[in-house]
Image (cartoon, rainbow, N blue to C red):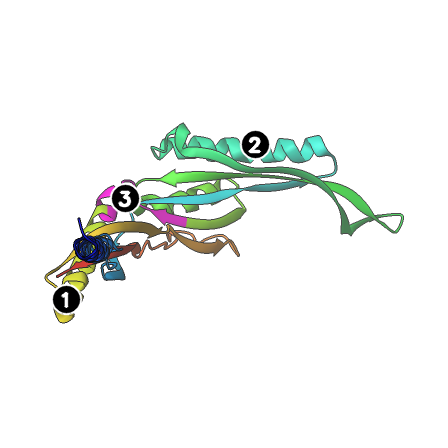
Amino acid sequence: MNIRTKRTLLIAATVAALAGGLVFEAVAAASSASVGPAASPATLSLSASGQVITTPDQAFITIGVTAEDRDARGAMRRNRSAMARMIQSLAGQGVAQRAIQTSSLRLEDFRDENDRTLGAPRIKYRATNLVTVRVDDLRKLGAVVDLLVGDGANQIHGVTFDLKEPEAARDEARRKAFAELTGNAALYAQAGGYRAARLVSMNEQLDYRSRQVDYAMAAPPSPGASTAIEGGELTVRVNVSASYALVR
């Protein structure tokens, strides 16, 4: 092989090597482009609420007796006598024993400024017993209060209205909240030029409170008139928030 032939073969090999390198770089670049990170899908965050207004069908009233005496045993004895009459009257009205729960029991001493011994206020004792009573027939609520006052009750600490079975109202509020949520998601998706909104996650917050009415006893009810206590309305509300992925 002469010098000219060797030089021709060397040039051909160099050209082939350079061409192979260019092809490899092109393939590598194409491969790198194909495995790059995909664009994040557009997302949508929304919140909605649904509520149901209904009427209560049960009530809880906290009521009881405060009695005073010159000694602790006397105060407790007076209190116990009045409470026994109250419990008996509740049973006569069809209130089950399990619907009566003691909520406060106190015994304390105090200085009676209106009863003095040798110029100093006399030390006396005050016994207080409060029970929370569940009344399932709201039509009897006023009459029950009057009956207990007649038995010696002299403390009333408010009335709370509630639902015996709140699940039906909660589920209806949930359906309303979800309908509003999905309707708004579809509207925003269409307005933005997207084909659909796919639900990704959802959270719920239940906003339901029993209705409490302050009722402080100022004076015994008038004879022959039942104390008026009205249940009014209760609002059951469900708040939801959700995240959607928008689909082209």
Crowd rating for badge 2 (residues with CA inside 10 Å; few <14, some 14–19, many 20+): some
Query: Nearer the observer, disc 1 or disc 3?
Result: 1
Up-down relation of residue 138 to residue 47 (above or below): above
The residue lying at 68 percent from left, 33 percent from top is 74
In this view, 180 is above or below 91: below
- Name which of mark 2 and mark 1 comes first in the sequence: 2
In the displayed structure, would residue 134 be above or below residue 56?
Answer: above
Secondary structure, mark 3, is loop
x%, y% of residue 54? Answer: 24, 53
Give the x, y percent position of residue 207.
34, 53
N-terminal-most mark, 1 or 3 = 3
Amino acid, disc 1: Leu
Residue 177 appears in the rendering: no
Q: Residue 8's spot in the image, x, y percent? A: 17, 57
Q: Nearer the viewer, mark 2 or mark 1?
A: 1
Quadrant where the C terminus is found in the figure: bottom left
Q: Amino acid at mark 2?
A: Ser
- Tell me the tag on residue 187: 1
**Among the 4 quarters of the image, the one containing residue 166:** top left
The amino acid sitting under disc 3 is Pro
Q: Which residue is mark 2?
A: 81
Q: Nearer the viewer, mark 2 or mark 3?
A: 3
Residue placed most toward the observer, 174 or 244: 244
As helix, strand or loop, the secondary structure at mark 2 comes to helix
Q: Residues within 10 Å of mark 3 (few under 14, many from 20)?
A: few
Q: Which residues are magenta?
A: 160-170
